[in-house]
């Protein structure tokens, strides 16, 4: 049994998915190749045979005709990449292909079964360009009027094609062509007037399209004007070209250099289409900047103004959903107009919803609704900003709850230590003091009786009791400094300075007492800092300064030691930092080798 090769198995697994895309690319490449080859070959054969028929002749015109075709081909490739619908790209390729029919007509007049069809489809490119204009920029015919226009021009073209096949029968001696085998009702008069009618009907339809686009352009808002900035001009120039062609056909009029205007107008239409789509795509890229604008917080007024500026729609409004009131309202809290959910004339609405319910409703110019990707980008940007705001608010609430919880733990610890210190002071310490007094009395009685041995034993016991009492007092002071209870923070720090092995200069600038937790925190932090300075810094002098400014207390402990101190895991300074952060404060250590150490504690204090 032979094992299957992994690479072959992988190829077989991928090919069904990739095959449709490959086929689509191959079909498009073939269509583009045929359209380009048809135009180039037609112009080359016309130049070689010097047979241009009724068309303008010469190398300059050949270059113009090939350039227009290439313009449509290039824009078609771009449209396939930019527009969601493939229809605009195929319309451009079709227009480029049938654009060459006018050049092929004089070349195929020797084949009677071919030239009537070529003559009939000579103007098909114009039909396709008209449909392209109407489906701008989404690639779809969204309005009923547009679909009616397409139907009308299709019927008119079909009548014109049928007229050529049935009535066209030019004299072979005059046109140099073979007889039309399809002309069952040959009539030069009918063929002539059908040609005139086709041109005037086509001109009327084109004028209708132009009037529709121009009216829409002038009556629309800034977004619609910017999206369709070249199309009206191109349509007007094309209408002029059609009029000129109709006059040339009916009156045998030579327009001279004005004949270059129609090709220029025709060539402007696909770049106008692609340019508008690129402009809308540029708006989508700018929408991403809205996330940066609202990264800190979803400011409703800022979001509305930034979105209006990004989309160039000054009339844009954003209505936010109020969950308690169950309604949409403006950023100022005013109720949204009742007509907003039903869309007002010339306006469209975009509802932004999430899994947790409605978020906002954006009322914008109807021109922006033609770009689904743009509206998706707006929706995604707003959802992302709202989600970030919700996560940020949730994180801030969690952090605040942790701070409050830690502060409650600190306060409970403070109360527990104070109670323990009070119990030691009022209980065990008082009993030991009473015992010391009793021993002194017993010692005095033993000395009075002359019992020196008993008196010595009692004195040694009194000394041991005094040592135990001193250690108990030190222990109680470590649990909670009594001086803070009996005195204030100034006296407590001054006592620390007197107990230190280094000279300590104390400056306490406080007009009132601080919260008990804060005073205890400052006391133990200063005690630890002075102990570190005495043990490790080699300092000769220290200073402690405490000051309050508004809602903040600042403590500075300085020494002139060797420096180099830093917060390390398990060190005393880490304990200082933990104590300060437990009351929402901050501890900063600035220590340079040879220049001493400065420890700054900043603690917030409620007013």
Image (tube, rainbow, N blue to C red):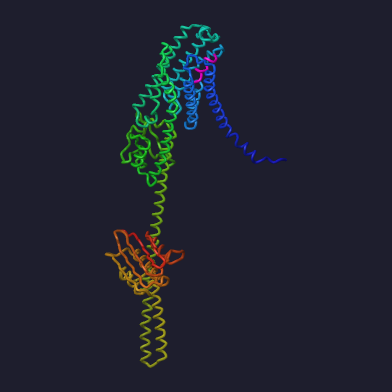
**Magenta range:** 99-108
Place of residue 429 in the rendered image (x, y in percent of width and height, measured from the top left): 37, 76
- Examine the residues drawn in magenta and state their main secondary structure: helix
Q: Is residue 322 visible?
A: yes
**Does 285 lie within the magenta span?**
no
**Residue 426: in sight, yes or no?**
no
Residue 347 drawn at (x, y percent): 36, 31
Q: How many marks?
A: 0
Examine the image and state in which quarter residue 546 appears: bottom left
Along the line of sight, the residue nearer the viewer: 178 or 343: 178
40 relative to 486, above or below: above
Q: Quadrant of the C terminus?
A: bottom left
Question: In the rendered image, which quarter contains the N terminus?
Answer: top right
Residue 255 in the image: x percent, y percent? 40, 16
Residue nearer the viewer, 450 or 576 = 576
Please provide percent x and percent y for residue 216: 36, 25
Q: Is residue 122 above or below residue 412?
A: above
Q: Residue at x 42, y 87 (%)?
A: 457
Instruction: Identify which residue, 288 or 143, lies in the foreground.
Output: 288
- Direction bottom: furthest residue: 450
462 or 384: nearer the viewer: 384
Give the residue at x 38% y 90%: 446
Q: Is 105 included in the stretch rendered in magenta?
A: yes
Dividing the picture into quadrants, the one containing residue 356 is top left
In the depicted structure, whether residue 123 falls above or below residue 567: above
Give the farthest residue toward the right.
Answer: 1
Left or right: 242 in relation to 28: left
Say above or below: 131 vs 18: above
Q: Quadrant of residue 49?
A: top right
């Amino acid at each position: 049994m032979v094992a299957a090769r992994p690479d072959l198995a992988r190829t077989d697994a991928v090919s069904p998915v990739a095959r449709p895309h490959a086929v689509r690319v191959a079909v498009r490449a073939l269509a583009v190749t045929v359209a380009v080859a048809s135009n180039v070959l037609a112009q080359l054969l016309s130049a070689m045979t010097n047979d241009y028929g009724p068309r303008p002749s010469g190398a300059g015109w050949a270059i113009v005709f090939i350039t227009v075709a290439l313009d449509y081909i290039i824009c078609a490739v771009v449209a396939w990449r930019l527009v969601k619908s493939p229809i605009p790209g195929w319309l451009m390729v079709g227009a480029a292909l049938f654009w060459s029919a006018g050049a092929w007509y004089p070349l195929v007049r020797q084949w009677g079964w071919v030239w009537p069809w070529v003559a009939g489809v000579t103007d098909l490119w114009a039909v396709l360009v008209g449909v392209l204009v109407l489906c701008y920029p989404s690639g779809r015919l969204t309005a009923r009027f547009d679909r009616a226009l397409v139907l009308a021009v299709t019927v008119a073209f079909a009548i014109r094609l049928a007229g050529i096949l049935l009535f066209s029968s030019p004299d072979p001696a005059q046109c140099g062509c073979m007889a039309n085998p399809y002309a069952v009702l040959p009539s030069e008069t009918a063929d002539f007037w059908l040609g005139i009618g086709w041109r005037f009907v086509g001109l009327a339809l084109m004028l209708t399209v132009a009037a529709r686009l121009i009216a829409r352009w002038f009556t629309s808002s800034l977004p619609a004007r910017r999206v369709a900035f070249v199309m009206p001009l191109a349509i007007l120039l094309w209408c002029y070209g059609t009029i000129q062609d109709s006059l040339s056909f009916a009156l045998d009029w030579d327009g001279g250099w004005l004949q270059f205007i129609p090709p220029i107008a025709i060539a402007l239409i696909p770049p106008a289409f692609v340019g508008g789509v690129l402009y809308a795509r540029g708006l989508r890229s700018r929408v991403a900047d809205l996330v940066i604008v609202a990264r800190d917080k979803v400011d409703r007024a800022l979001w509305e103004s930034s979105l209006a500026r990004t989309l160039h729609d000054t009339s844009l409004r954003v209505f936010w959903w109020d969950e308690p009131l169950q309604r949409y309202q403006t950023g100022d809290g005013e109720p949204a107009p009742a007509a907003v959910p039903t869309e007002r004339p010339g306006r469209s609405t975009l509802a932004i919803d999430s899994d947790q319910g409605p978020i906002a409703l954006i009322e914008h110019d109807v021109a922006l609704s033609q770009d689904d990707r743009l509206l998706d980008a707006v929706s995604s940007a707003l959802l992302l900003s709202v989600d970030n705001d919700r996560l940020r608010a949730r994180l801030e609430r969690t952090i605040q709850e942790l701070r409050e919880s830690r502060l409650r733990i600190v306060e409970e610890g403070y109360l527990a230590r104070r109670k323990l210190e009070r119990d030691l002071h009022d209980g065990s310490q008082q009993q030991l003091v009473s015992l010391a007094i009793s021993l002194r009395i017993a010692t005095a009685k033993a000395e009075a009786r002359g019992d020196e041995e008993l008196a010595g034993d009692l004195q040694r016991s009194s000394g041991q009791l005094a040592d135990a009492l001193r250690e108990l007092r030190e222990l109680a002071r470590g649990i909670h400094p009594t001086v803070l209870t009996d005195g204030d923070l100034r006296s407590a720090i001054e006592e620390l300075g007197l107990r230190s092995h280094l000279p300590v200069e104390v400056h306490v600038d406080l007009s009132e007492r601080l919260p008990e937790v804060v005073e205890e925190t400052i006391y133990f932090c200063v005690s630890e800092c002075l102990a570190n300075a005495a043990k490790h810094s080699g300092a000769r002098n220290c200073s402690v300064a405490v000051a309050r400014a508004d809602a903040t207390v600042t403590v500075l402990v300085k020494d002139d030691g060797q420096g180099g101190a830093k917060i390390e895991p398990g060190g005393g300074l880490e304990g200082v930092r933990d104590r300060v952060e437990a009351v929402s404060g901050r501890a900063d250590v600035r220590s340079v080798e040879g220049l001493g150490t400065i420890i700054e504690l900043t603690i917030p204090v409620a007013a």
